[in-house]
Image (cartoon, rainbow, N blue to C red):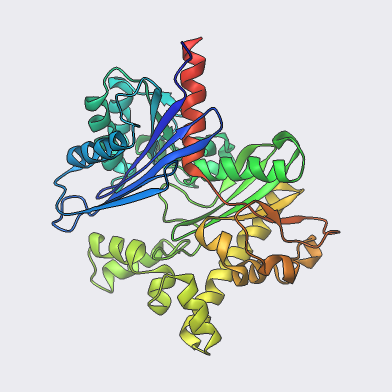
Amino acid sequence: MTSPTRVLVLNSGSSSVKYQLLDMRDRSRLAVGLVERIGEQTSRLKHTCVTGGDTREQNGPIADHDAALKAVAQELARDGLGLDSPELAAIGHRVVHGGMFFTEPTLIDEGVLTEIERLIPVAPLHNPANLTGIRTARGMRPDLPQVAVFDTAFHTTMPEPAARYAIDPKIADRHRIRRYGFHGTSHAYVSRETARLLGKDPSEVNVIVLHLGNGASASAVEGGRCVDTSMGLTPLEGLVMGTRSGDLDPAVIFHLERVGGMSTDEIDTLLNKRSGLFGLCGDNDMREIRRRVDEGDEEARLAFDIYIHRLKKYIGAYYAVLGRVDAVAFTAGVGENAAPVREAAVAGLEGLGLAVDAGLNGARGDDPRLISPEDARVKVAVVPTDEELEIATQTYALVEKNSR
């Protein structure tokens, strides 16, 4: 009997579950779906059987994650892809924060769950939801290997000078304060795919990866290892994002508290949900912002310029960190689709060997591609990210290793 080759990837949010079922023989998708607004009367489950080309949608109340995963299991079973299938090798879970304890994909047991729970204070918005999804899935298939793949793991290779904040180390260690970084599965996948695009082994290539979505982060990847990244203790640090401020003078917080009379929760909401592009111009959709810019909207223009200024600063900083850069790779929703962002981000950096070809940059495509002139010293690439495939790959590799 052949070994099972399917992996179900679960990404459990506070009110949603994203999922994909993949066959690792050829890395193909068998089913994809999303359950959203869990706990509300207006819950929705959208499920697509990729092999059959059939998309179904359910609308109506889904009480909790347990009910959501049972509904997902029913949809998969309707396509002959149920959780009881002998072809299912494992379930891979996205976990946002693994601290310094988890540096690689990890088989889940009670000890692992306890440690993920201990990390809730540094990831209060994410780890509780991740835990809920894991516990629900384990209850449904307690016999099946389940693997945690951590957003932070790829960044644990950062050297101490990049990972440490300049505060009392005793206080920092007591409260686990250091720079962890996020979007690690995306940065790992894109840096490897960029090396493949250049026809080189990842160990030979230095890449600046720009993951630009509603959340945004940059990383400096040296020979396949992360040596710096823009997000820190939380996903708030770094680039200007859809609703997050990114880098900020810490004294702004004290000022808002003392002079503005704002509470800690109010400041938290301001910086995480009412700042970034949304705070600057009332929109966090780059397509809408660019439309407004093209129509002469000065508020949108300023928001776009601030976004680009921060992005360009990080490109320059990570060029200095790496010393030699082979490629800059744009990925995620904005990075893959917003040609004006890519053009503006490298404009004026010709002295560093960076430029884009207008025709290549403006062309659409779903595959990894170069958008720099043929003779460019530093290649500029668009590399669609695939975090679910990365989670499935890491999950399957671990299960295969342990079964030998």
**Visible residue check, residue 184:** no
Is residue 92 found left or right of 143 in the rendered image? right
Which x, y percent locates residue 192? 64, 40
Residue at the limit of the structure toward the bottom, as seen here = 296
Identify which residue is drawn at 52% across, 31% down.
393
Which x, y percent locates residue 241? 46, 63
Identify which residue is drawn at 53% across, 90% down.
296
Is residue 206 found left or right of 108 in the rendered image? right
Identify which residue is drawn at 67% across, 69% down.
362
Give 258 or 371, whichever is nearer the viewer.
371
Is residue 103 found left or right of 9 in the rendered image? right
Is residue 294 positioned above or below 221 on the image? below
**Visible residue check, residue 178:** yes
Is residue 268 found left or right of 148 in the rendered image? left
Give 155 or 188, whichever is nearer the viewer.
188
Is residue 333 positioned above or below 96 on the image? below
Identify which residue is drawn at 39% across, 65% down.
243
Q: Quadrant of residue 343?
A: bottom right
Is residue 374 positioned above or below 186 on the image? below
